[in-house]
Image (cartoon, rainbow, N blue to C red):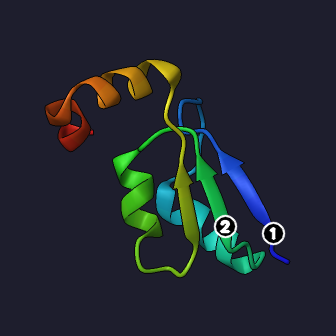
């Protein structure tokens, strides 16, 4: 069993990515779902041992599925 949280980065007054990681680790949260591929959040979570799942919108799935170059840049 594990504890996971959902994080959306498109909000105001969100703590810094590094502060979020400190909070996650202090509460022994081992799994995170991001609602977007926020570069700052992904960088902060790298090499922390926290497993990350990144959400993709329906519109993004269509574009990614239709175009290898869009998929590569995503």
Write the residue at 62% across / 52% down.
Answer: 33
73 left or right of 56?
left
Rounded to the nearest angstrom, the CA distance separating label 2 from label 1 is 7 Å
Instruction: Tell me which numbered mark, 2 or 1, is placed earlier along the sequence.
Output: 1
**Position of 48 relative to 42 (above/below):** below
Q: Is 25 or 14 nearer to us in this picture?
A: 25
Q: Is 54 or 28 nearer to us in this picture?
A: 54
Write the residue at 75% across / 79% down.
Answer: 28
19 left or right of 3?
left
- Of the 4 image quadrants, the one containing the N terminus is bottom right
Write the residue at 60% across / 60% down.
Answer: 20
- Kindly check if marks 2 and 1 are in contact, taking CB atoms under 8 A apart as contact: yes
Residue labelled with disc 2: 31
* Label 2, residues with CA under 10 Å away: few <14, some 14-19, many ≥20: some
Most distant residue in the left direction: 69
Give the percent coordinates (x, y) of residue 57.
Answer: 51, 26
Residue labelled with disc 1: 3
**Position of 73 relative to 58 (above/below):** below
* Label 1, residues with CA under 10 Å away: few <14, some 14-19, many ≥20: few
């Amino acid at each position: 069993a594990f504890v996971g949280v959902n994080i959306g980065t498109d909000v105001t007054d969100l703590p810094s990515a590094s502060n979020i990681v400190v909070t996650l680790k202090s509460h022994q949260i081992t799994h995170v779902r991001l609602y977007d591929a926020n570069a700052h959040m992904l960088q902060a979570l790298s090499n922390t041992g926290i497993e990350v799942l990144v959400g993709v919108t329906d519109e993004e799935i269509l574009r990614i599925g239709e175009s290898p170059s869009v998929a590569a840049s995503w």
